Amino acid sequence: MEFTPIKLRRGADEPLHLQLAEELRRYLLDNSVKCDFLPSERSLCEQLKLNRSTVHRAYENLLQRGVVRQCPNKKLEVIPGAKKILAGAFPSIGVLLPEKFSLYVEHNNGSTLRYLKGIFDRAAERECSIYTLQIPPPETPEKEMRTFIESNFKKLIGIIHLGARKSLSDPALEMVFKYHHLPQICISGRALTSHTGAIYTDFTAAARELARTLVAKKCRTVGLISNTFSESGAFSYTAQERGARVRDILVAEGLTILPRWELNFPLKSDIPQLLAENYARHPELPDFIWCHNDDIALLALQFFTSQGIRVPEDLKIAGFDGSDPAKDLTSIGQQFHELGAGAVDLLWEHFEHGINKENKIKTIEAFFVPGKTV
């Protein structure tokens, strides 16, 4: 096994054996490294051009900390659970924000705070600290990004991503995702890197329950109001697929999509104005309209009732998220707290055991919110 990435500051005040012990600690914590045994003292001496005494004292440091044990054949075996010992008390988890915190909360309708509650609660249960970071701007020079990564990530056992920016190109975020030495988890999104995990909502069962409720209430035709998202090379939100997946489930349960009321709007569109324009062109409404989120559903509810349309008698409406302010709204609810808590659990799993096909992705079940608008 090659240990040449280990960097020592020869001539520094700190003794070489302590530097080497710290570098070995960081090496064993590296998520991209699988190390069951340390090389012999002689082998490491040759690789790093060190004297035997320096390597011996560094190995003694690891033995005393209980990170390695000596086998009968004199080999030093890295013990199971070594990473947890090396991480120390209250290890830090990084939470990466794509923009200024107050703006991000505003742009995400408060869901960020609900994710964070889950993250902070589960981190406290696991005796971890939280280290919040705002990623530098997309145009940050590569050298400055390397400094940002090296100075901040060495303090962490992993990173949780709360989302991406609206930029089509984001080299800064791409550099973060390419950093494979720490486990990284995306909440409600996916990165294109194989070493990054994800946790998101599975709403299949909840959408089926909604569809079957509609069928039981004699609904036949359906409209959809979905958001369109700009593509990013580094990250994709699972919400991009939401409209198409809900559509497929509604059709599979026997409902018919009314094409003139299958609408796709960019984020932050003037929903009432766009609804007014479509209603003027197509006054014949479907039996039911599904909306991409609860905010859009509430705007739709306000618009249609202002036109004298009774909800749910003349038109049924449902949203997505199960937001607290929308208690009377029929919706598909997300478990935001559990998504945040689950992100911590998944990161810890990847930190201790590595990432594989079985543990790369975790899903949290959505739930049907009956409400009063269906």
Image (cartoon, grey):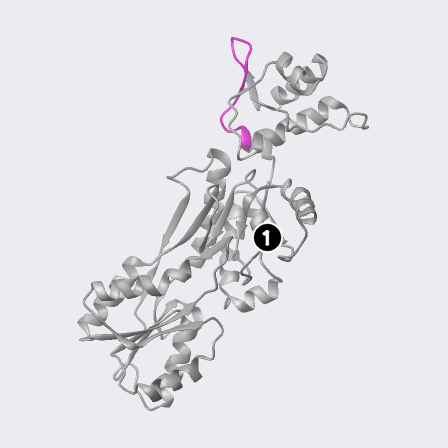
Name the side, left or right, on which 295 lies relative to 5. left
Does the magenta portion include 78? yes
Q: How many marks?
A: 1
| Quarter containing the N terminus | top right
State the residue in front, 372 or 1: 1
The quarter holding residue 152 reads: top right
Q: Which residue is mark 1?
A: 171
Image location of residue 7, percent across then percent down: 69, 29
| Quarter containing the C terminus | bottom left
Mark 1 crowdedness (10 Å alpha carbons): few <14, some 14-19, many ≥20: some
Residue at image location 60% in from the left, 37% down from the top = 89
Does the magenta portion include 187? no
State the residue in front, 356 or 260: 260
Residue at image location 49% in from the left, 60% down from the top = 114
Q: Is residue 346 above or below residue 169?
A: above
Q: What's under tag 1, amino acid-wise?
A: Pro
Image location of residue 368, percent across then percent down: 31, 64
| Extent of the magenta region | 70-83
Q: Residue farthest to the top? A: 73
Image location of residue 313, percent across then percent down: 25, 83
The quarter holding residue 290 reads: bottom left
Residue at image location 28% in from the left, 81% down from the top = 315
Label 1 element class: helix
Image location of residue 43, percent across then percent down: 62, 14
Name the side, left or right, on which 133 lies relative to 239. right
Q: Is residue 350 above or below residue 121?
A: above
The quarter holding residue 336 reads: bottom left
Q: Residue farthest to the bottom? A: 308
Name the side, left or right, on which 36 lies relative to 16. left
Q: Is residue 324 above or below residue 72?
A: below
